[in-house]
Amino acid sequence: MTIETTVDGSAGLPGNGKKSKLGVWMCAALVVGNMIGSGIFLLPASLGAYGPISIGGWLFTGAGALLLALTFARLSQMIPSAGGPYAYCRAGLGKFMGFLIAWGYWIGLWSGNAAIVVAMLGYLGIFIPEINQNPMLGAGIAVGTIWFMAWINCRGVKSVGVFQLVTTILKTVPLVAIAIFGIFQINPEHFTTINTSELSNFNALTSSAALCLWAFLGLESATVPSENVHNPEKTIPRATVLGTLFAAVLYIIATTSLMGLISPADLAQSTAPFADAAAILWGPAGTVVIGVAAIISCLGALNGWTLMTAQIPMAAARDGLFPESFGKISKRGTPALGIIISSVLVTLLVLTNYSRGLVGAFNFIISLAVMTTLLPYTMSTMARLVLQIREREKLGTVIPKRDIIISSLAFLYSLWALGGSGMETVYWGFLLLIGGIPAYIWILWKKSPHTTESDTCITTAG
């Protein structure tokens, strides 16, 4: 059953015709494109320190990601409204929790975009060394890239979908090629020592699984622009599960191939593991191909996340939980002002930090982005059960045991991942969320500008 909420309101919006909407393949490309960003091109090097046991980390995290994908798939059928995790938490857990989710998620999205741009410049520096030597040149390219993606998103969701589909294909083909061809050239000796770290097998497995989670952030992407999706009740669940499964299989096979091609010691020291593997398979030309694929990967991820930075505030604005300007729709059917405001913030973050190199800032921004994304995951798993309990009370239906098991396991996994993100990240992330409360109060006050102190006292006394 579909539960109606005030988040919807898609009727009559410009650009919401069938021709301008996303189908299952474009939605799946949005999921895969947002998950496969800059991280996967470096992650195998981080996992190299743990050795083959990290493959178990991939399997554990992949299972957790699939539980979350199934949770979001069901929620997208219950709440077919724009906003994804925000819409679900708003409907299930109330306005205040909905605001906190939208606030933290939005900040995590645009700050994460700044990190993606910086990562892209690092790959681009392979072909244009002047970027590493001239901060002004690098900053200029970064700003130009940010606003190019803003322009594509302002053109309409169809442009976003086409760009995402093309970039997803271009960046996954080289990774799939390495995964397939590398399997036939692996060195069995690289797998003789299962755990190459100094940690116990359990701790090594847990640590590697926590790292692997970075590669799955974005699995909820198809649920966010649901108003721009054709037949969302069927399309979004299929795209979410298919996209997550595809990425999980690709990650596991590709990492196995890399570990078989490159020795554990060399892999742990590599700054470009996929490029090193491509050089082994195809020589110098392979390095160039992977370098281009990494740049395309960043562009595709930036495109998809730019869409997200506008869709989340738009849904919250319609509920009166964000400033009204974020909810305005352009003639092309896009929240153009929200895209522009978010892009301005990304630009400021990049310009303020780029001259300092962004090394420490890059890691910190990414950590905050992970934490502010995990919170919506955790809350959404519980929102699903709350919504089903309400449905049971209203219609007398029975909650399937499968739904209870999936939501509970997804909650436990999210809680574990949230704790595993580190004390410092949780600390700053908590302060970030608390810092949004004054904004929430201000928005409520702006909605009732004629309320006076005497009115408040009379109302309270009554």
Image (tube, rainbow, N blue to C red):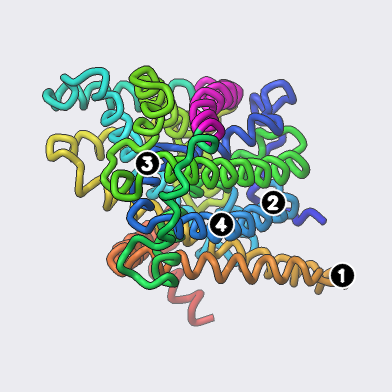
Of badges 1 and 4, nearer the viewer stands 4
Reply yes or no: does residue 302 show up in magenta: no
Mark 4 or mark 3: name the one nearer the start of the chain.
Answer: 4
Given the image, on which type of amino acid does mark 2 rest? Ala
Give the CA separation, mark 2 to mark 4: 21 Å
Reply yes or no: does residue 163 show up in magenta: yes
Badge 1 vs badge 4, beta-carbon distance below 8 Å: no
Mark 1 or mark 4: name the one nearer the start of the chain.
Answer: 4
Give the CA separation, mark 3 to mark 2: 38 Å
Q: Is residue 455 above or below residue 84?
A: below
Given the image, on which type of amino acid does mark 4 rest? Leu
Nearer to us in this view, 155 or 302? 302
What is the number of callouts on the image? 4
Question: Which numbered dot is residue 73?
Answer: 2
**x, y (%) of residue 29?**
60, 32
Q: Quadrant of the N terminus?
A: bottom right
Disc 1 secondary structure class: loop
- Viewed as shown, does residue 322 lie left or right of 329? left
- Binning the other alpha carbons within 10 Å of mark 3 as few (below 14), some (14 to 19) or many (20 upward) gives many
Mark 2 or mark 1: name the one nearer the start of the chain.
Answer: 2
Q: Is residue 297 above or below residue 244?
A: above
The residue lying furthest to the bottom in this view is 461
Write down the residue under mark 3: 262
**x, y (%) of residue 37?**
44, 37
Nearer to us in this view, 216 or 462? 216
Disc 2 secondary structure class: helix
Write down the residue under mark 4: 59
Disc 3 secondary structure class: loop
Mark 3 or mark 2: name the one nearer the start of the chain.
Answer: 2
Write down the residue under mark 1: 397
Residues drawn in magenta: 154-181
